[in-house]
Amino acid sequence: MSSRKVIKIAGRYLLALTMYFVSGLVLAQTAWDLDAVLADSTIFDEANQVTKRDALEIEGIRLSPVEGEVLAFTQRRKIAILSKPLQSSGYFLLDEDKGACWAIARPFPALMIITKEAIIQRNRDGSEQVMSTDKNPVVRELASLFSSVFTGDVSDILLSFDVYLLRDGMPKAGWVVGMKPKGKNQYGKPKEIRLIGDSTLRWVTFVNQSGDQTVIEFSAANDQPFDVSARCFKG
Amino acid sequence: MFDANKHHVRAILWGCLFALVVADFCRIVVQGWPVDGDIFSLLPEESQDASVNTAVKYYQQSISNKILFFVGADEPASAKQAAELLVEKLNGSEYVSSVNGAMDNASETANSLLYKHRYQLLSSAAKEMLSQGRATELKQQSLQMLFSPLGVTDSLLLQYDPQLLFVDFLKELTESVSIFSITDHWLTRSHEGKTYFFIDVDLGDVALPMDHQIALVSDVRLIQQTVLGTSRDVSIVSVGTVYHAAAGVSQGKKEVSTVGVGSAFGVLLLLTLTFRSVVPLVLSCVAIGSGVLAALVVCFHVFGRIHVLSLVFGASLIGVTIDYAFHFYAEKNYDGATSGGYNGASALRRVLPGITLGMLTSVVAYLSMGVGPFALMQQVALFSAVGLFASFLCVVCLFPLWQGATGIVATRAKRFSSVMLALPHTAVMRHKYRVLMLVVVAMSPGVFLLTPLDDVRLLQSSPESLKSEEKRFFDIMGVRSAFQFYLVSGDTVQAALQTEEALLSKLEQLKNAGAVKRFNGITQVLPSIKTQAENYNLRRQSLVSDDQWADYYQTIGFDDDQQAAFMDAFLAQNNNQMTFDAFSASALFERTKAQWIGLVEGRYYSVVTLSNVHDVNALLDVERELTDVVWIDQVADFSSVLKEYRESTTLWVLLAYCLIAIFLMVRYGIKTGAIYMLPPMVAAWVALGAVGYVGSVFNLFNVFALILILGIGIDYVLFFAENEGAAAPTMLSITLSAITTILSFGLLALSQTNAISGFGFTMLVGISCVYFLSPMYAMKSQGDQ
């Protein structure tokens, strides 16, 4: 083999290798492998634990979705004993004063607004169920958990959960915040929660005691079949 | 000789009796003073049904033996740390029987018992939907629970309860039962930006002796201070009946010593200044001491324990029991040196009719205060009557025994008496009836200003700091427990539970109407067997006949095998109701046992407690509609008893004044009799007017004072009327008695307890007035000439 040929082949390999690395880098910059992130338990290593309330702020991590911006969400709930995942989708809107609104569109329309004071459920027929947080501690737990998460209030979370942060190896300067309830597991509280995002929050996942998993994915709401803001807060 | 022997025998008998009293008193002291400061112990037995009363007492006991804490801080972690420290320190206290802070696995074990009986338990909403055939709505509710982002679902739960009706039941249960959040195994509340951790302390036996209660409270407060010292950020708020009891006892102790020491000091000073001899001093101390000791011993035997307020009233007795000694020595020593003096026996013979009559009228006056359902006044009445009688006995049996000198009346005292005796003869007394008229008219606006206030809380003198701490506690708690509650009963446990369910369903309607914010009963957690069976049947009927469920199973992906497995499990659980025995052995019972009294005199009792009551009348109506449900409102009942009793006692007092007037008119003729009635009547009017003018409240205790003003006032009048010849010694002894009586009741007027100070003030004004009026109207004076 002539030396020119060798150089040529070597050059191709080199190019391929470069391409491979470059494309790998590019891919790493653009794509999240959600299953891999969810399967990775190293997030809960002691080294990743966050103990100070301003630790996330320092890292420049914004747990909450952008206020006032309508997002689309898809929820997949995998319950071990059910033959298919329970899937729902709709729109999400955060308002600092009025709360976090989940406007479910599929499989049936329903609306849920979470504030620190109450969880309001609006049914198809327009009827409303208000579960006040000062009446029901479970509602209060959930409302407080969700509003802490969606307003980025870490100090509340730090009290009930051990909080972990992982940034290494995440695409797009992304981050994973993991939470585990302190002490023994309690009914109604998830076993672990992960918040995954980069410039914004992209997924929230819950795993409960029996291993059932819920994944909520947020994305830009390009087309809205109805005025989400009006339905949420003016209806 | 015979006479002397008779006196010796009397003295020896008295000595034996006194020795017995002293011995018994020592025994009582050694066993620990059974003195209480709890206002509840003064409440009258209000129901006709004895077992209801016993049940209410059990309930009071269970709430009295608790201290509750909130430990709070801006930073939840530091609040938790302080709460842990507090629990640790409280556990080390010898007075505390158990401390409940962080919960172990109680909630899980509790839920597992409920889970076992899940097919028998339904939320009230689900029950309503099922019984009205609204399965579609129920299906929609279950779907939302599964698909919503906040849904609480679980494979384990879903497998044997695909409709999630057990989750629904638990949701309603937590909503109705708990007002707390759970943070890291602790019950917590958020208030004004702070997180508060809740601690519940059980004291065991509250029937603690007085000193133990005070020691317990100071121990608990010391622990609280120690924990507060560890962090600047932390605050601790706590409530407990024992705080009020201990504050009442300490306050009472202070007042007992103020009144007791003040009166005793005044008596001794008067004796010394007037008679200037050691013997009257010593013997008078014995008379007072024997009176007080006998009164205490008899009260402990009759009532088992004595309330600290009774002791405060009782302390004023010192100023009254000394009267007989004054009469004796004023008579004996008035002209001691000049006329060769009386010996003890002849002095006694002279004063005996007067002091016997005086003792009898006072004992009757005091005892008449004790008629009625009123623990405090019963104790005061018996205490005073026994005390007076014992000191009278002492004067009669012991005083004549001393053969030696007992001093002579000081010249200054005699001079004072003569000045007082000269008063009726002064020029102004020509117009004595006009003067009296003027006084009556002047005081009338005061009398019309009187505002009756019959509130049981007038008997409580808890410090402001305690009240504001309590208010803060309930602000954090978010609810204010009502003093009112329902007592539900039944011949069997199940009968009581069923009656309670009927009550709760009515209360649910009232809650929706805004009459009450919350209510709690044991059947919210443990429905009756009957209801559990109904729940199961409703569910079975729906599962078998509603075709909604096939569609539902398909939507959620619950396959045929799973459906079959679920139905098998469901059908196998027929008649698997949760029994009371299983329930009472569980951790759940621990959390609801405040609602269950249990078996009392052949009936089973449960308690339905209420918070934030807005419409008492609506709640009272419910009692009328149901049998075996009794509405207990102790504050209102007791206050209305106070009111009724004030009204009826006022009538009795008027009757007593009339009867005495008739007696005087029969004895002395209509005109003179009417004149003799003037001093106590005008004194009572002036006293009432003064109460009105100073703007203090008017209640039963002022009326009691009127009885004593009549009793004591008539004594004064009669002494003057009957002893016109020996006016000087009478004037002296009445002056001395009046001074000590006024001193004692005047000191009572300083009490922090509204009812006691009102009584003292009325007495102070009334007795002062009657003292000045008696000689002027009971003796011949300028106006009569």
Image (cartoon, coloured by chain):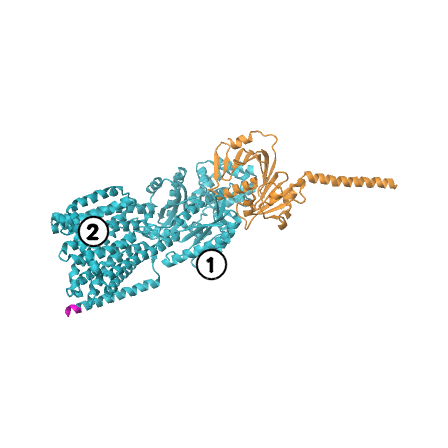
Mainly helix, strand or loop, the magenta region?
helix
Amino acid carrying mark 1 in the image? Gly
Amino acid carrying mark 2 in the image? Phe
Q: Which residue is mark 1?
A: B92
Question: Does mark 2 fall on the same chain as mark 1?
Answer: yes
Q: Which residue is mark 2?
A: B772
Q: Is residue B656 visible in this depiction of the protein?
A: no
Q: Measured from the top left, where is residue B529 in percent x and y?
A: 42, 46
Local SS, label 1: loop
The residue nearer to you, when weighing B137 against B38, is B38
B4 in magenta: yes
N-terminal of the two: label 1 or label 2? 1
- Label 1 resides on the chain identified as B
Count of numbered circles in the view: 2
A4 in magenta: no
Q: Measured from the top left, where is residue B169 in percent x and y?
A: 47, 43
Name the residue furthest right. Answer: A2
The residue nearer to you, when weighing B479 against A123, is B479
Q: Colour of chain B?
A: cyan
Callout 1: few (<14), some (14-19), or many (20+) C-alpha neighbours within 10 Å? few
The quarter of the displayed image where residue A33 is located: top right
